[in-house]
Image (spheres, coloured by chain):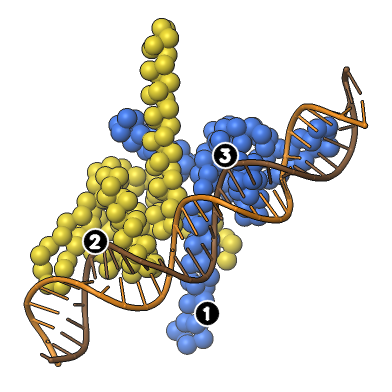
Chain colours: A blue, B yellow, C orange, D brown
Amino acid sequence: MSQAQSQRMEAMCESARTHVDHLLVMLSKSKMLNILYVMNCDPAPMRFSEIKKRVDSSSTTIARRLAELEASGLVNRKAYATVPATVEYTLTKDAIALRPSLDSLFEWVLNRADETV
Amino acid sequence: MSQAQSQRMEAMCESARTHVDHLLVMLSKSKMLNILYVMNCDPAPMRFSEIKKRVDSSSTTIARRLAELEASGLVNRKAYATVPATVEYTLTKDAIALRPSLDSLFEWVLNRADETV
DNA sequence: GGGGCAGGTTACAACATTGTTACAAAAAAA
DNA sequence: TTTTTTTGTAACAATGTTGTAACCTGCCCC
C-alpha cells in the first residue's frame, strides 16, 4: 500500500471513529435511552407531551434530546397547524433498526432491577 | 386488593423504577458503554492500563467508571501483590448477560457510522 | 380583556463532570 | 541513587448540563 493510500485509510478510520464516538456520546446523554425506548415501544407517532410524560423529565431536556435526535436523523418531526399546536415525532428507519438492541438492553435492565429489589 | 397491598405494590414499583433509573443513569455515563464493550469483546481478564488504552480516556475517568461498575456488581476487581501492582478486571455473570445487547447495539452504531462517513 | 392550551425557547443559577497535575508505594533496573 | 512501572487518589479549575421561571404564538372561549 502506498503512503497516500495508507494516509487516506487512516483518515477514514479516524472519521469513522469520530462518528462512532459522536453516536455513543449522543446515546449517553441523559434520558436519551429512555426516549428511544418509549418511542420504540409504541410504533405510532408520539406527541411532545406524551413523550415528556412517559419519560418524566423537563420540557427543556426533552426538547433538547428530540432536537439532537432529529439532527442525527433518528426522528422525524411533523408539526400540524392546529390550535393549539400539534407536533408528532416518529422514529426513522435507522432508529427502528435499533429496536432489537434496545429491547434486549431494557430486558436486561429490567431483569437486573427485579433481582436487586 | 387491599389498600395495604396496593401501597406495597406501589412501593415495589417505585423501587423498581429507581433501580431501572439508576442502571440507566450508570449506563449513560461517559465511556461506560465503551468500557463494557471492550471488556465484552475480550473475555480474558483485563488490566487497568489495557482498558484505559482501548477506551482512550483519562485514568481518573476510567478509575471512576470501574469503581461504579464494581459497586454495581458488574465487574470484579482482583489485585495481585506484584511490583509494580497488577490489577485485573473481569465482567461478572450479570454483565456478560449484557453481551448480546451490546453486540447488537455496537453493530448498529458501526453500521450507522459507516453510512455517515 | 383575560385565561387556557400545546409546544416550545431563553436566561440563568445551581449542580455535576471532566481532565490536569501532583502525589504515593514498592521493588527492580540503570 | 535515581528512574521506571502500575494503579490509582486528591484537589481544583474549567467546562458542561440541568431544571426553573418567564415568556412566546396562535386561536378559542368566557
Q: Quick one: label 1 or label 3, which is nearer the N terminus?
A: 1
Residue under the image location 38 percent in, 24 percent down: B12
On whether disc 1 and disc 3 are found on a single subunit, the reply is yes
Name the image quarter holding residue B42: bottom left
| Marks 3 and 2 close (CB-CB < 8 Å) | no
Per the image, label 3 sits on a secondary structure element best described as: loop
Q: Is residue A104 visible?
A: no
Is residue A43 left or right of B5 when viewed as pictured?
Answer: right
Image quadrant occupied by the N terminus of chain A: bottom left
Is residue A4 left or right of B99 when viewed as pictured?
Answer: right
Chain letter of disc 1?
A
Q: Tell me which amino acid carries mark 3.
A: Ser
Q: In x, y percent, where is residue D26?
A: 89, 38
Which label belongs to residue B2?
Answer: none
Give the camera-side residue of A86 and A90.
Answer: A86
- Which of labels 1 and 3 is toward the front? 3
Q: In x, y percent, where is residue B100?
A: 36, 45
Q: Residues within 10 Å of mark 2 (few under 14, many from 20)?
A: some
Can you say whether D29 is above or below D5 in the image? above
- Which of labels 1 and 2 is toward the front? 2
Per the image, label 1 sits on a secondary structure element best described as: helix
Can you say whether B43 is above or below A61 in the image? below
Is residue B87 left or right of B105 when viewed as pictured?
Answer: left
- Which of labels 3 and 2 is toward the front? 3
Q: Residues within 10 Å of mark 1 (few under 14, many from 20)?
A: few
Give the residue at mark 3: A57
Give the residue at mark 1: A8
Can you say whether B9 is above or below A82 in the image? above
Chain letter of disc 2?
B
Name the image quarter holding residue C22: bottom left
Residue under the image location 61 percent in, 43 percent down: A62
Give the residue at mark 2: B46
